[in-house]
Image (tube, grey):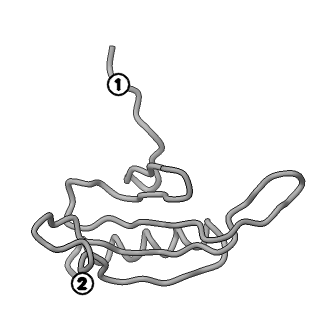
């Protein structure tokens, strides 16, 4: 039986580990890490409020400390994912 695909956004995988969401293909040169820094309550549900966005290289020869290429903090998960997608697209095209 074929493996069930995970969540995909604009042809790139989204993988969640707790309050971290990784966006992008790990075999590409770059990936984005979204970290939920705070949450707000809305109709009994916790929704991400403040989200840190980090564009990172996947190059294993680069030290962990130097892997972050670009970062920002935004309000709202949807806005953060849109920014992450724009950064990832630009850097994967080579338009840094």
Disc nearer the start of the sequence (1/2): 1
- Label 1: few (<14), some (14–19) or many (≥20) C-alpha neighbours in 10 Å: few
Using the image, determine if residue 87 lies above or below residue 17.
Answer: below
37 lies left or right of 46: left
**Residue 49: which quarter of the image?**
bottom right
Question: Dot 2: what SS?
Answer: loop
**Residue 44 pos. (x, y %):** 87, 51
- The residue that mark 1 highlights is 3
Query: Which numbered disc covers residue 62?
Result: none
Taking 30 as reference, is 53 left or right?
A: right
**In the rendered image of this protein, does residue 3 appear above or below residue 24?**
above
Which one is in front, 49 or 3? 49
Residue at 48% in and 43% down: 7
Q: What percent of the width, then of the height, locates residue 43?
A: 89, 54
- The circle drawn on residue 95 is 2
The foreground one among 5 and 68 is 68
Query: SS for tag 1?
Result: loop
Quarter holding the C terminus is bottom left
Please provide percent x and percent y for residue 33.
42, 66
Q: Position of residue 90 (x, y in %)?
A: 31, 77
- Residue at image position (29%, 54%) is 25
């Amino acid at each position: 039986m074929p493996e069930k695909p995970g969540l995909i956004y604009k042809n790139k995988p989204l993988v969640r580990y707790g309050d971290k969401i990784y966006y992008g293909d790990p075999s590409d040169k770059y990936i984005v890490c979204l970290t939920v820094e705070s949450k707000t309550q809305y109709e009994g549900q916790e929704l991400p409020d403040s989200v840190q966005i980090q564009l990172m290289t996947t190059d294993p020869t680069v030290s962990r400390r130097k892997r972050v290429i670009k970062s920002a903090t935004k309000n709202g998960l949807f806005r953060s994912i849109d920014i992450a997608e724009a950064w990832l697209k630009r850097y994967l095209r080579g338009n840094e």
